[in-house]
Amino acid sequence: MQNPELILTGPDSIVASIPYLLGFTPCDSLIVLWLNDGRLRLTMRLDLPPERVSSDEWVDAVLQQRAEHDEVILCVVPAQDDPTHDQEGELRSREFVTTVLERLAPSDCHVRDALLMSGDRWWSYLCSEPECCSSAGNPVDPAIAEATAARFVLAGVGRLSDRQSVIDICAAEPARQALTREHLAGFRQSRAQRLASAVDRQREFELWRDESIELVREVLLTSMPIDVDRAAETLWALGDVRVRDTAIWEIAHDAEHNAEHNAHRAFDMAAGLLRSAPGEVTAPIGTVTALLAWLIGDGVRAMAALDRVHVEEPGYALAELLRRSITAGLPPAGWLEMMRDLSRDACRGRHRDSAPAA
């Protein structure tokens, strides 16, 4: 599951695509688009280095991906009120971009373009034609901007006004957390009673797992409406590693067979559950939310979800594995391939664990 197939024919389509690739309109940012065989494989966003500060760490952060890709596009986006040119008339951040280009030169990674973006205008750091990149810049062709937006919208991909708006999608909502916590208490009690009264506690526990896997699948992968009680039950169920891993297996296999918009709907549902999750049940749903975001090519939302997990449970192993995968620039296809090599039964791990105490 990826964003719609992009045709990056030139600067206009690049500039028009970036807000959708990130999920928000960036500012004070360096955007790096890494490609292989002409196809976009990874979108990176970094804060621009402060003025008069060594940019070596920023350059190193950019270049760590060069060995995995054969083409790159660099885009600088100044802060909203910052000028596009310095006092000498040079494009903002030219020295930084030049350093990146010089470090890329000995590699096999071709620089397709290096742009400065501001609003609906762009300038090219690679351009040597004054009449092409004047101080006024080049306006994005409205027809290209409209066609680009339409492709993303039809795929269910939107954009928000700024990065904070993206982060807020995964932020905790205290009122909903409190309500969920009340329902969790009741659910814990009813499950304990169910296990305590069972003749075969292990069989009853495995039955609960199967029911929980089906519940998570329905909540995330279908259009079934849910109430607070069902949301709390889903959050609690994901705390069981077998339920969580089998649900992830289901998500990965659904990714191969269903349309793109299903993945976006699943992410929206998971993010809603994450916003309502109290601290003790945050890590599993946060990791699943991050995985769904990554599968639709939304690294910003994925990292926002993982940040929630890190705050609540810093050592949550699956979240840290996912964070390392995203930070290393691994494509989601690698995760899907790994899941294809596993059977559902391996994830389910039936009868390997003992039933918990009632």
Image (spheres, rainbow, N blue to C red):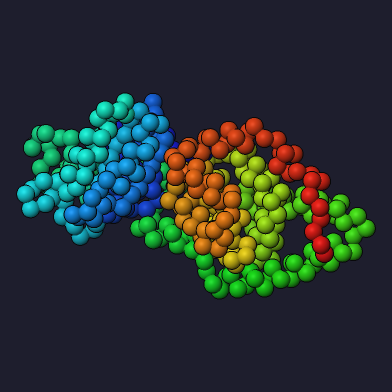
| Up-down relation of residue 19 to residue 189 (above or below) | above
Q: Quadrant of residue 40?
A: top left
Q: Quadrant of residue 277?
A: bottom right
Q: Please state which of residues 33 and 231 is positioned toward the viewer in this rendering.
A: 33
Residue 38: horizontal and vertical position, in percent? Answer: 36, 28
Q: Please state which of residues 243 and 15 is positioned toward the viewer in this rendering.
A: 243
Query: How many discs mark residues in the rendered view?
Result: 0
Q: Which residue is rendered at x = 85% and y = 61% of the image?
A: 195
Residue 198: horizontal and vertical position, in percent? Answer: 90, 60
Residue 266: horizontal and vertical position, in percent? Answer: 57, 50
Q: Which residue of the protein is positioned furthest toward the left in this rendering?
A: 88
Q: Quadrant of residue 208?
A: bottom right
**Residue 260 is at least partly visible in this image:** yes
Q: Which residue is rendered at x = 58% and y = 70% of the image?
A: 177
Residue 138 falls left or right of residue 268: left
Residue 64: horizontal and vertical position, in percent? Answer: 37, 38
Quadrant location of the C terminus in the rendered image: bottom right
Q: Which residue of the protein is positioned furthest toward the right in this rendering?
A: 199
Q: Which residue is rendered at x = 17% and y = 49% of the image?
A: 92
**Residue 3 is at least partly visible in this image:** no
Q: Which residue is rendered at x = 71% and y = 71% of the image?
A: 185
